[in-house]
Image (cartoon, rainbow, N blue to C red):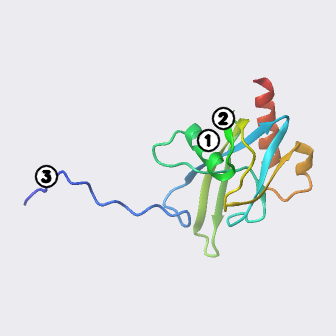
Amino acid sequence: MTLDLSTSAPESKPASTRSYPARPIVAVSAAIVRENRVLIARRARAPAQGVFTLPGGVVEVGETLREAVQREILEETALTIEPVALAGYRERIARDRDGKVEHHFVILPFAARWIAGEPVLNEELAEARWLVPSELAGLTTTEGLAEIVASALAIIGRG
């Protein structure tokens, strides 16, 4: 039996997929507060195409949650933010017709302060609006959005 003691890097593994994942995917989002309004975005593509939600995305390996939310918000909206604290959590588990888990996200939404910039959307978002919480009522939103927004406003108000 021979052992390979070479110091070459191991072959890289393929990037994990978001559909039919081997484990839950961690994502972050931000309820960005500016003058008592929160930035709400409408998704341009699946999942949740056409639904209003908070901007955000998947945490990359080696990133802290705060780094991830700042990067995602900058990429999706061109805004600079200050994450203050977690405003709750959400889970999204979707199964296909056979009952197999097709998507499983653990989403950690932050209460965040707007620092600079005006929304410039990337291809993931179709629209962005600065809204007061009462304006969410007539919109199709992700589950629990109003509660996360209320929590974020309370956190920012205490700070």
Q: Position of residue 25 (x, y in %)?
A: 55, 54
For label 3, the residue is 5
Tell me what residue is drawn at x 78 percent, y 64 percent: 50
Circle 1 packing at 10 Å, graded few (<14), some (14-19), many (20+), is many
Number of the label disc, if any, that sits on residue 96: none
Label 2 and label 1: CA atoms lie apart by 7 Å
Q: Give the left or right position of residue 85, taking residue 51 as reference.
A: left
Q: Give the structural element (helix, strand or loop) at label 3.
A: loop
Which one is earlier in the sequence, the residue at label 1 or at label 3? 3
Label 2 and label 3: CA atoms lie apart by 45 Å
Q: Position of residue 159 (x, y in %)?
A: 75, 24
Image marks 2 and 3: residues in contact by CB distance under 8 Å: no
Q: Give the vertical position of 53 relative to 148 (above or below).
A: below
Tell me what residue is drawn at x 67 percent, y 39 percent: 80
Three-letter code, disc 3: Leu
Which corner quadrant of the image does residue 155 belong to?
A: top right
Q: Position of residue 157 (x, y in %)?
A: 81, 27
Foreground pick, 125 / 5: 125
**Which residue is at the far top?**
159
Three-letter code, disc 1: Gln
Q: Give the structural element (helix, strand or loop) at label 2.
A: strand
